[in-house]
Image (cartoon, grey):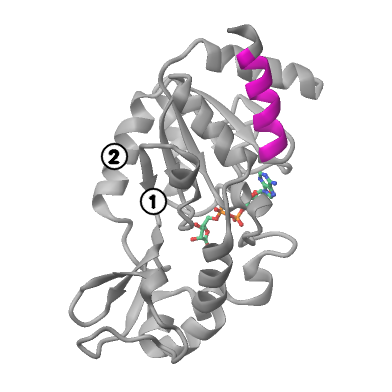
């Protein structure tokens, strides 16, 4: 088995040789910013059944309950969250001309805050709420959540502009993700369990089109050893710092 240093060096070699890398990120990259992941120890789905709380049918049936158990707490955590070294590392990779696009399953806006300019929000965003009646969009931070569920001026219920289970991926996000993925030379897969489709198919599309797939994750995933060429075991912030240190050194 290769040492961590050897794995990082291998990743650095691939990154240094491309100007067309794409990142696919998941909840794991935001854990170091204080936002809980979904699966694994401490994950949200340890406390809740996602089908009871994050499915569109649950939202339509009882929006107050979904707001109370899921949305309100997440909104408060996300309002306070700031990018960590994992997000900052991806922003630096863009500045260096290596990384073109971040495809994220996260709804926290931290990649944009860190400075990445092309972020595809595959599962939408918590920064905005959408009226379930008239479709009007309002910024989440302007929403008064003291009475649940919050309502639009028209009286309709406001819901996060994010993708619930049972809903379609925003078509433009899906299309652009497939296009950028198929064209990239290196795909960095950071902090995702890679089991929720269709996001989990992006590394496969990258691989089939000749890209090198590099995972950063403390745990192995279904991609590991099958789709990904390299798994760098560790936390996103620490590993990104080590990758960047080597890349900057080599310049
Ligand atoms: N750095 C990097 N990865 C980490 C870290 C860390 N510090 N800590 C944990 N991880 C990894 C875990 O090992 C796991 O593989 O992050 C991953 C988090 O997995 P999930 O919680 O399943 O998150 P994600 O893959 O984004 O989930 C996909 O499922 O329910 C949904 O819609 C939700 O977008 C989400 C989708």
Give the residue displayed 63% in from the left and 23% down from the top.
244
Q: Position of residue 227 (x, y in %)?
A: 55, 31
| Mark 2 to mark 1 CA distance (whole Å) | 10 Å
Give the crowd class for mark 2: few <14, some 14-19, many >=20 residues within 10 Å. some
- The N terminus, quarter of image: top right
Task: Report how many numbered discs are placed on residues in the image.
Answer: 2
Q: Which residues are magenta?
A: 237-248
Q: Assign the magenta stretch its main secondary structure.
A: helix
- Residue 238 in magenta stretch: yes
Tell me the SS state at disc 2: helix
Give the crowd class for mark 1: few <14, some 14-19, many >=20 residues within 10 Å. many
Reading the image, the residue beneath label 2 is 176
- The C terminus, quarter of image: top right
Note whether ligand 1 is within 8 Å of mark 1: yes
* In the rendered image, the vertical position of residue 166 relative to residue 121, given as above or below: below
Q: Quadrant of residue 7?
A: top right
* In the rendered image, the vertical position of residue 109 relative to residue 250, given as above or below: below
Q: Position of residue 151 (x, y in %)?
A: 32, 86
Give the residue displayed 52% in from the left and 43% down from the top.
25
* In the rendered image, the vertical position of residue 109 relative to residue 142, given as above or below: above
| Residue in front for this viewpoint, 149 or 170 | 149
* In the rendered image, the vertical position of residue 78 relative to residue 69, given as above or below: above
Give the residue displayed 39% in from the left and 70% down from the top.
140
Q: Is disc 2 in contact with disc 1, using a CB cutoff of under 8 Å?
A: no
Tell me the SS state at disc 1: loop
Q: Position of residue 28 (x, y in %)?
A: 63, 50
Give the residue displayed 48% in from the left and 82% down from the top.
66
Q: Position of residue 225 (x, y in %)?
A: 65, 31
Reading the image, the residue beneath label 1 is 122
Quick one: label 2 or label 1, which is nearer the N terminus?
1
| Residue in front for this viewpoint, 102 or 3 | 102
Q: Quadrant of residue 168?
A: bottom left
């Amino acid at each position: 088995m290769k040492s961590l240093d050897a794995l990082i060096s291998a990743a650095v070699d691939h990154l240094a040789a491309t100007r067309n890398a794409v990142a696919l990120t998941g909840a794991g990259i935001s854990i170091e910013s204080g936002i809980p992941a979904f699966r694994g120890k401490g994950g949200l789905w340890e406390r809740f059944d996602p089908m009871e709380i994050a499915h569109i049918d649950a939202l339509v049936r009882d929006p107050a309950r979904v707001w109370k158990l899921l949305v309100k707490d997440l909104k408060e955590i996300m309002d306070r969250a700031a990018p960590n070294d994992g997000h900052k590392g991806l922003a630096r990779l863009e500045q260096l001309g290596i990384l073109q696009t971040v495809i994220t399953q996260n709804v926290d806006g931290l990649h944009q805050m860190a400075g990445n300019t092309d972020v595809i929000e595959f599962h939408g965003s918590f920064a905005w709420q959408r009226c379930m009646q008239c479709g009007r969009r309002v910024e989440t931070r302007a929403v008064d959540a003291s009475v649940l569920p919050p309502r639009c001026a028209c009286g309709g219920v406001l819901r996060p502009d994010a993708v619930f289970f049972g809903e379609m991926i925003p078509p433009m996000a899906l299309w652009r993700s497939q296009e950028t993925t198929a064209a990239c030379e290196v795909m960095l897969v950071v902090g995702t369990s890679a089991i929720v489709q269709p996001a989990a198919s992006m590394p496969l599309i990258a691989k089939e089109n000749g890209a090198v797939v590099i995972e950063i994750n403390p745990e192995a995933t279904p991609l590991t050893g099958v789709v990904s060429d390299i798994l760098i075991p560790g936390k996103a912030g620490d590993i990104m710092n080590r990758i960047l240190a080597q890349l900057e050194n080599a310049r």
